[in-house]
Image: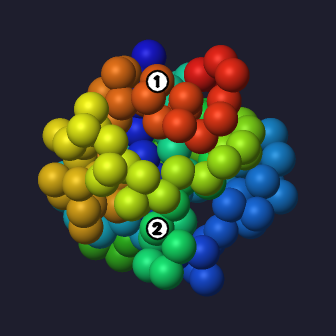
């Protein structure tokens, strides 16, 4: 299993919006960055990801699961970019802010800090476990 981070502006698509979709999930459409698209191409069903509210909040607020692997994004008229489908798994009991991540030396190499503008990024297993603990999850999913 691999781990990921999905960034979204809450005014465009929020964690509450994602949760409302339930088990049918939602396509993660609109990505127009080649590296982010390649990250989605690497995703497999069952992979988990953090749902990150960007812009003003800058915090991890929930966990999602990939339920549909990479396929064409119908919102891309060029046909170059794809999407994955994700479903909400659980809330982060205590949201983990960008400041929290920056303040944790064990997360210094995290893509969130090194490639801050990338909308879909990988998370290493040790980073996943650390952030889940920081967020108050008793057991990392």
* Residue 38 showing in the rendered view: no
Q: Quadrant of residue 89?
A: top right
Cα distance in 3D space between marks 1 and 2: 19 Å
Spot occupied by residue 111 in the image (x, y as percentages of width and height): 23, 47
Secondary structure at numbered mark 1: helix
How would you rate the neighbour count of disc 2 (Cα within 10 Å): few for under 14, some for 14-19, many for 20 or more? some
Q: Earlier in the sequence, mark 1 or mark 2?
A: 2
Spot occupied by residue 4 in the image (x, y as percentages of width and height): 41, 39
Spot occupied by residue 135 in the image (x, y as percentages of width and height): 59, 40
Q: Does 51 appear above or below 9?
A: above
Q: Residue at x 36, y 30 (%)?
A: 127
In the image, taking residue 114 as reference, residue 4 lies left or right, namely right
How would you rate the neighbour count of disc 1 (Cα within 10 Å): few for under 14, some for 14-19, many for 20 or more? some
Q: Residue at x 36, y 21 (%)?
A: 125
- Give me the disc on residue 93: none
Spot occupied by residue 86 in the image (x, y as percentages of width and height): 60, 44
Q: Is residue 13 or residue 112 the one in the foreground? A: 112
Q: Which residue is mark 1?
A: 129
Q: Which residue is mark 2?
A: 58
Q: Is residue 23 or residue 95 the one in the foreground? A: 95
Secondary structure at numbered mark 2: loop
* Residue 140 showing in the rendered view: yes
Q: Does 111 appear above or below 53?
A: above
Q: Residue at x 27, y 32 (%)?
A: 106
Quadrant of the rendering where the N terminus is positioned: top left
In the image, taking residue 16 as reference, residue 58 lies left or right, namely left
């Amino acid at each position: 299993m691999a781990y990921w981070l999905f960034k979204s502006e809450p005014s465009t698509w929020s964690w509450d919006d994602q949760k409302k979709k339930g088990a049918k999930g939602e396509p993660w459409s609109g990505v127009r960055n080649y590296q982010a698209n390649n990250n989605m191409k690497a995703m497999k069903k069952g992979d988990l990801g953090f749902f990150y509210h960007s812009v003003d909040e800058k915090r991890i607020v929930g966990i999602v699961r990939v339920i549909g692997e990479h396929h064409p994004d119908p919102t891309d008229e060029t046909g170059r970019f794809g999407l994955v489908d994700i479903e909400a798994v659980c809330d982060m009991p205590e949201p983990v802010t960008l400041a929290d991540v920056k303040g944790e030396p064990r997360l210094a190499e995290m893509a969130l800090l090194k490639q801050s503008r990338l909308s879909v990024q990988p998370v290493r297993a040790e980073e996943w476990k650390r952030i889940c603990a920081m967020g108050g999850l008793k057991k990392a999913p």
